[in-house]
Amino acid sequence: MRASPGRVIAERTFQLHTTRGVRPVTMRIGAAVRDRQPGGDWLCPVTIVGAPRGTVPPGMHAVYGIDPLQAIVLAIGYAQQALALLQRRSKGKLTWLETTDLGLPDIIGLVGVRRSFRSRGRSPLAKGRAATDRGRRTTPVRPRR
């Protein structure tokens, strides 16, 4: 399912410094909403605007969680991975408030998503496209009990 923009709950604009100059790149995260499928999980839309063509998957992406909080946490993690991919592919550096610290917590390390994707041999951004995009869904990371 494609995410609809809905209400934006978080937005941050970074500066991308490359050999071609400096350009603004904006990350937007929408409010978590319930998936329309019966018994569906929650989804959180994520968009990266202003990135050079071919550096991050274009458009809006739905990131799924088993509840609204997990959807938001995983959306921040997805945005982190997309921004890291943007830096690698553009051979540039992102800054926020004139520092390379983008002010985002290490969400991916906290919830163990990095490990689960490595064990399956793929990244959530494999081949420039989110694993949650185009009808494919990642398995939500369920909390350990």
Image (tube, grey):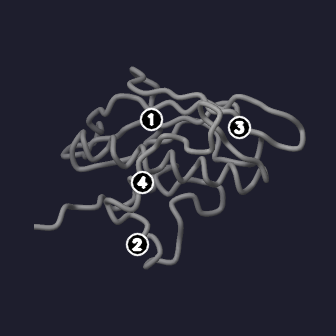
Please report the residue visible at 69 percent of the width from the left and 33 percent of the height from the top.
15
Residue 4: name its quadrant.
top left
| Numbered badge on residue 3 | 1
Given the image, on which type of amino acid does mark 1 rest? Ala
Could you classify mark 4 by the number of other residues whose Cα lies within 10 Å: few (under 14), some (14-19), or many (20 or more)?
few
Mark 2 or 1, nearer chain start: 1
Please name whichever residue, 100 or 37, is drawn nearer the observer in this view of the structure.
Answer: 100
Between circles 4 and 3, the one closer to the viewer is: 4
Instruction: Give me the C-alpha separation between circle 4 and circle 3.
Output: 22 Å
Mark 3 or 1, nearer chain start: 1
Instruction: Name the spot of residue 55 as percent of width and height, x first.
Output: 72, 48
Instruction: Give me the C-alpha separation between circle 2 and circle 3.
Output: 27 Å
The kind of secondary structure element at disc 2 is helix
Residue pointed to by mark 4: 106
In the picture as drawn, the residue positioned furthest to the right comes out as 20
| Numbered badge on residue 115 | 2
| Numbered badge on residue 51 | 3
Instruction: Give me the C-alpha separation between circle 4 and circle 1.
Output: 24 Å
Residue 106: name its quadrant.
bottom left
